[in-house]
Image: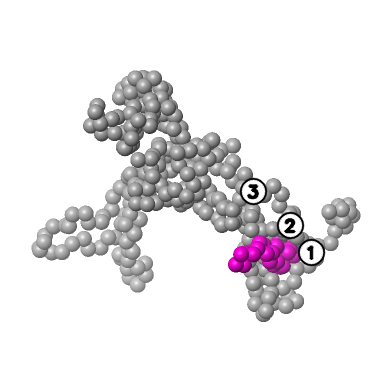
Amino acid sequence: MKGLIGKKVGMTQLYDDKGVLTPVTVVQAGPCVVIDVKNVERDGYSAVLFGFGSRKAKNAGKAVAGQAAKAGVNTPSIMKEFRITDDSKFEIGAEIGAGIFEEGEYLDVTGVTKGRGYQGVMVRHHFKGGRDGHGGGWHRKPGSIGCRESPGNIIKGKKMPGQHGSVKRTVQNLRVVKVDSAENLIFVSGAIPGPNGGTVLVRKAIKK
Amino acid sequence: MNIIDKIEKAQCKASVPDFNIGDTVKVSTKIIEGTTERIQNFTGVVIARKNSGIRETFTVRRFQNGYGVERVFPIHSPRIDAITVERHGHVRRAKLYYLRDKIGKAARVKEKKYFGPAASAEAAK
């Protein structure tokens, strides 16, 4: 599957040739260096192991530093495997950039959403809450969370207060508006998870 | 310069006509009718300029067929062909929203008069 590791740069807007304005997120996708190519004979499946970014070998985990040393490339800050069908196309040490994607293509982008801490049900699950006037006393609470003796317990998965955000999320079917292969930038239509500077995985959309 | 700034700067028009709040301007926009493209003009008073950089917009108000009509134009839109200043207005506010409550003679903006060196500088433009 076509994919890369990238960094969310931020959001802006782009005019197309007709003068229509599109909100876009800029993703710095690549250059990703090929650290390992897995094949069916040796590993039982085909995949390519990409490294992105850089960090000192002494600061990286031994697994990452060891793999990079074996491949003879600089130690990456992030390492990620992508399943592929044809393992003959990749060579260890090769650099893959944003040029593999083209305009008009659809992508799935995975990232870790912004952490919002412990939040109540109104923020976390968009509950309506109670009214503020007329004697209220029930403003931002969840209200009843279950029945009486039967069934006598709370249904699993009941929406309650708790940690909001900072979870892995994928946004599907985002259109590629523009690709700048010289700077390794991909412009995708719409928003993607995570803060600016956050790590994202960019893959070809599975549903298109 | 960071990447986003660079992208936005590249999209901004190289030169934007110099106009201010209260000026009467003619905005020429390219519109597509079927297969042909033509220029449509909209003339009125600039009552607001908002935001900056690639997101900057301005609002033009005019009185048309008994109704007040306002249009908001993005300054850097490629659909905008030209902005011509027809008259400079003398105003003391950055946003002329008070014009919305006035009709007829009360909804006028005083013309800006230039004196001394400013007058010759304006004439040279």
Dot 3 and dot 1 within a common chain: yes
Residue A200 falls left or right of residue B67: left
Residue A193 seen by the camera: no
Q: Does residue B51 lie above or below A100 as drawn?
A: below
Q: Position of residue B122 (x, y in %)?
A: 84, 55
**Chief secondary structure of the magenta span?**
strand
Q: Nearer the viewer, residue B81 or B75?
A: B81
Q: Residues within 10 Å of mark 3 (few under 14, many from 20)?
A: some
Q: Is residue B14 left or right of residue A99?
A: right
Identify the residue at horizontal 39%, vertical 19% (top origin). A72
Label number found at residue B19: 2
Q: Nearer the viewer, mark 3 or mark 2?
A: 3
Q: Which residue is mark 3?
A: B12
The residue that mark 1 highlights is: B87
Q: Chain of mark 1?
A: B
Does the magenta segment cover residue B110?
Answer: no
Mark 3 vs mark 1: give the one in front.
3
- Chain of the residue where label 3 is placed in the rendered structure: B
User: Quarter of the image holding residue B28?
Assistant: bottom right
How far from the left and from the top, in percent, is residue A186?
Answer: 48, 42
Give x and y (percent) for residue A93: 41, 25
Q: Residue at coordinates 33% horizontally, 23% vertically from top-left?
A: A67
Looking at the rendering, in which quadrant would you find the C terminus of chain B? bottom right
x and y, in percent, of residue A140 in the image: 32, 60
Report the span colored magenta: B19-45
